[in-house]
Image (spheres, helix red, strand yellow):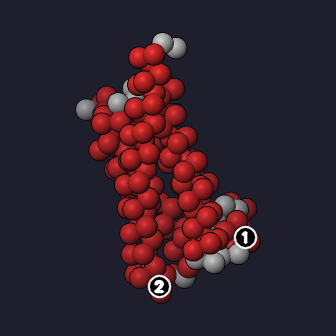
Amino acid sequence: MNDLEADNRWRIAFRSFAVWLLIIVAEIFHGILRAIVLVRFVGEFRSNQIGVFTGSAILLVIARLTIRWIRAKQPFELLLVGLIWLLLTMTFEVLFGRFVMGLSWERIASDYNMLKGGLMPLGLLVLFLSPMIASKLREKR
Protein backbone atom coordinates (compact mmCIF):
# COMPACT_ATOMS: atom_id res chain seq x y z
CA MET A 1 0.00 0.00 0.00
CA ASN A 2 1.42 3.37 -0.94
CA ASP A 3 1.19 6.58 1.10
CA LEU A 4 -1.79 7.88 -0.89
CA GLU A 5 -3.79 4.71 -0.20
CA ALA A 6 -2.85 4.85 3.48
CA ASP A 7 -3.91 8.50 3.71
CA ASN A 8 -7.18 7.66 2.00
CA ARG A 9 -7.89 4.80 4.43
CA TRP A 10 -7.23 7.10 7.40
CA ARG A 11 -9.58 9.69 5.87
CA ILE A 12 -12.22 6.99 5.42
CA ALA A 13 -11.76 5.84 9.03
CA PHE A 14 -12.05 9.40 10.37
CA ARG A 15 -15.16 10.11 8.31
CA SER A 16 -16.62 6.77 9.34
CA PHE A 17 -16.19 7.78 12.97
CA ALA A 18 -17.89 11.14 12.31
CA VAL A 19 -20.84 9.41 10.66
CA TRP A 20 -20.97 6.89 13.49
CA LEU A 21 -21.48 9.81 15.90
CA LEU A 22 -24.50 10.80 13.80
CA ILE A 23 -25.72 7.19 13.85
CA ILE A 24 -25.42 6.89 17.61
CA VAL A 25 -27.25 10.19 18.20
CA ALA A 26 -30.02 9.07 15.84
CA GLU A 27 -30.23 5.70 17.61
CA ILE A 28 -30.36 7.36 21.03
CA PHE A 29 -33.31 9.48 19.90
CA HIS A 30 -34.84 6.38 18.34
CA GLY A 31 -34.47 4.53 21.66
CA ILE A 32 -35.99 7.40 23.64
CA LEU A 33 -38.93 7.68 21.26
CA ARG A 34 -39.41 3.91 21.32
CA ALA A 35 -39.38 3.91 25.13
CA ILE A 36 -41.89 6.74 25.34
CA VAL A 37 -44.30 5.48 22.68
CA LEU A 38 -43.91 1.77 22.10
CA VAL A 39 -42.93 0.18 25.41
CA ARG A 40 -46.27 0.87 27.07
CA PHE A 41 -48.12 -0.93 24.27
CA VAL A 42 -45.92 -3.98 23.68
CA GLY A 43 -43.47 -4.15 26.60
CA GLU A 44 -39.75 -3.56 26.71
CA PHE A 45 -38.53 -6.80 25.14
CA ARG A 46 -40.96 -6.69 22.18
CA SER A 47 -40.18 -2.98 21.80
CA ASN A 48 -36.48 -3.87 21.56
CA GLN A 49 -37.28 -6.44 18.88
CA ILE A 50 -39.28 -3.93 16.84
CA GLY A 51 -36.53 -1.38 17.41
CA VAL A 52 -34.02 -3.60 15.63
CA PHE A 53 -36.03 -3.24 12.41
CA THR A 54 -36.79 0.47 12.74
CA GLY A 55 -33.20 1.13 13.84
CA SER A 56 -31.92 -0.82 10.83
CA ALA A 57 -34.00 1.41 8.56
CA ILE A 58 -32.49 4.50 10.21
CA LEU A 59 -28.99 3.06 9.70
CA LEU A 60 -29.61 2.38 6.05
CA VAL A 61 -30.91 5.90 5.46
CA ILE A 62 -27.89 7.45 7.18
CA ALA A 63 -25.50 5.18 5.29
CA ARG A 64 -27.21 6.02 1.99
CA LEU A 65 -26.95 9.76 2.69
CA THR A 66 -23.31 9.70 3.83
CA ILE A 67 -21.49 6.97 1.92
CA ARG A 68 -20.39 9.31 -0.88
CA TRP A 69 -18.94 11.77 1.69
CA ILE A 70 -17.04 8.96 3.41
CA ARG A 71 -15.47 8.18 0.02
CA ALA A 72 -15.30 4.44 0.55
CA LYS A 73 -15.68 2.77 -2.83
CA GLN A 74 -13.87 -0.54 -2.85
CA PRO A 75 -15.49 -3.56 -1.14
CA PHE A 76 -12.64 -3.67 1.40
CA GLU A 77 -13.16 0.00 2.27
CA LEU A 78 -16.94 -0.42 2.57
CA LEU A 79 -16.47 -3.42 4.87
CA LEU A 80 -13.91 -1.44 6.87
CA VAL A 81 -16.51 1.30 7.42
CA GLY A 82 -19.03 -1.32 8.50
CA LEU A 83 -16.51 -2.91 10.86
CA ILE A 84 -15.69 0.46 12.43
CA TRP A 85 -19.39 1.14 12.96
CA LEU A 86 -19.94 -2.36 14.35
CA LEU A 87 -17.09 -2.22 16.86
CA LEU A 88 -17.94 1.29 18.04
CA THR A 89 -21.63 0.44 18.39
CA MET A 90 -21.07 -2.79 20.31
CA THR A 91 -18.65 -1.02 22.66
CA PHE A 92 -21.08 1.84 23.16
CA GLU A 93 -24.08 -0.46 23.71
CA VAL A 94 -22.33 -2.58 26.32
CA LEU A 95 -20.67 0.28 28.20
CA PHE A 96 -23.74 2.53 28.10
CA GLY A 97 -26.05 -0.30 29.12
CA ARG A 98 -23.85 -1.47 31.96
CA PHE A 99 -22.44 1.75 33.39
CA VAL A 100 -25.01 4.41 32.51
CA MET A 101 -28.25 2.44 32.54
CA GLY A 102 -27.04 0.07 35.27
CA LEU A 103 -28.22 -3.03 33.39
CA SER A 104 -26.98 -6.44 34.45
CA TRP A 105 -24.73 -8.44 32.16
CA GLU A 106 -27.58 -10.93 31.79
CA ARG A 107 -29.97 -8.19 30.66
CA ILE A 108 -27.47 -6.86 28.14
CA ALA A 109 -26.79 -10.37 26.82
CA SER A 110 -30.52 -11.06 26.40
CA ASP A 111 -30.70 -8.64 23.46
CA TYR A 112 -28.02 -10.71 21.71
CA ASN A 113 -29.51 -14.16 22.40
CA MET A 114 -31.39 -15.05 19.23
CA LEU A 115 -32.50 -18.37 20.76
CA LYS A 116 -34.56 -16.36 23.24
CA GLY A 117 -35.85 -13.76 20.78
CA GLY A 118 -33.06 -11.21 20.99
CA LEU A 119 -32.61 -9.69 17.57
CA MET A 120 -29.62 -7.42 18.13
CA PRO A 121 -27.30 -9.66 16.05
CA LEU A 122 -29.55 -8.99 13.03
CA GLY A 123 -29.32 -5.24 13.62
CA LEU A 124 -25.55 -5.48 13.94
CA LEU A 125 -25.37 -7.45 10.70
CA VAL A 126 -27.36 -4.72 8.94
CA LEU A 127 -25.05 -2.13 10.51
CA PHE A 128 -21.96 -3.97 9.27
CA LEU A 129 -23.35 -4.37 5.75
CA SER A 130 -25.06 -0.97 5.48
CA PRO A 131 -22.11 0.81 3.80
CA MET A 132 -22.01 -1.94 1.14
CA ILE A 133 -25.81 -1.81 0.71
CA ALA A 134 -25.76 2.00 0.51
CA SER A 135 -23.01 1.90 -2.10
CA LYS A 136 -24.95 -0.60 -4.20
CA LEU A 137 -28.08 1.56 -3.97
CA ARG A 138 -26.11 4.61 -5.09
CA GLU A 139 -24.71 2.65 -8.06
CA LYS A 140 -28.20 1.68 -9.20
CA ARG A 141 -29.34 5.31 -9.11
Ranked by sequence position, the earlier of labels 2 and 1 is: 2
Residue at image mark 2: 41
Relative depth, front residue between 65 and 11: 11
> Does residue 43 appear to the left or right of 72 in the view shown?
right
Residue at image mark 1: 105
Q: Position of residue 130 (x, y in %)?
A: 45, 43
> Residue at horizontal 72%, vertical 70%?
105
Residue type for callout 2: Phe
Give the spatial CA distance, label 2 vs label 1: 26 Å
Could you classify mark 1 by the number of other residues whose Cα lies within 10 Å: few (under 14), some (14-19), or many (20 or more)? Answer: few
> Residue at horizontal 63%, vertical 63%?
94
Give above or below for 32 relative to 112: below
Could you classify mark 2 by the number of other residues whose Cα lies within 10 Å: few (under 14), some (14-19), or many (20 or more)? Answer: few
- Quarter of the rendering containing residue 67: top left
SS at mark 2 in the image: helix
Q: Where is residue 70 in the image (x, y as percent from the top left)?
A: 35, 36
Give above or below for 37 relative to 97: below
Q: Residue pushed farthest left? A: 141
